Image (spheres, rainbow, N blue to C red):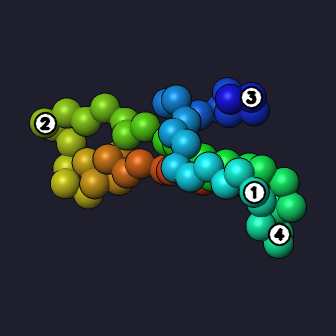
Amino acid sequence: MLGWSWLDATPVIMKNIGDGTSDHPYSHTLVAGIARDPCKVTAAMSKKKITKRSKIKCSVKV
């Protein structure tokens, strides 16, 4: 997949639309991936900091 080098993980093809739709009159694909992985946490961190660092950012592209 071109243009997805900023993702942390390999993109996953969610849905392949071969005929096209009214918005995209050509064949296209719905792709999802992880934009930001969770950060490392240690036992010394507070619960608030662990919760904040455990969030995952996802991205979806047509």
Q: Nearer the viewer, residue 48 or 21?
A: 21
Q: Quadrant of residue 26?
A: bottom right
Q: Earlier in the sequence, mark 1 or mark 3?
A: 3
Please say if 41 is above or below 47.
above
Q: Amino acid at mark 2?
A: Ala
Q: CA distance from mark 3 to mark 4?
A: 22 Å
- Callout 3: helix, strand or loop? loop
Q: Which residue is mark 1?
A: 19
Mark 3 or 4: in front is 4
Kindly indicate whether the residue at mark 4 contacts the one at mark 3 (C-beta within 8 angstroms): no
Kindly identify which numbered label has been placed on residue 50. Answer: none
For numbered disc 4, what is the local secondary structure? loop
- Give the amino acid at mark 4: Asp
Asked whether residue 12 is in view, the answer is: yes
Which image quadrant is residue 41 in?
Answer: top left
> In terms of sequence position, does the residue under pointer 3 or pointer 2 come before the other?
3
**In this image, 10 relative to 45: left or right?**
right
In the image, is 15 to the left or to the right of 45? right
The residue pinned by badge 3 equals: 2
Whole-Å distance between the Cαs marked 1 and 4?
Answer: 12 Å
Mark in front: 3 vs 2: 3
**Figure quadrant of residue 13:** top right
Distance (Cα) linking label 4 and label 2 = 49 Å
The local crowd at label 3, few if under 14, some if 14 to 19, many if 20 or more residues have their Cα within 10 Å, is: few
Label 1 Cα crowd, 10 Å radius (few <14 / some 14-19 / many 20+)? few
Which residue corresponds to the image point at 20% horizontal and 50% vertical from the top-left?
Answer: 46
Kind of residue indicated by mark 1: Asp
Residue 35 locus on image (x, y percent): 55, 42
> In the image, which disc is placed on residue 43?
2
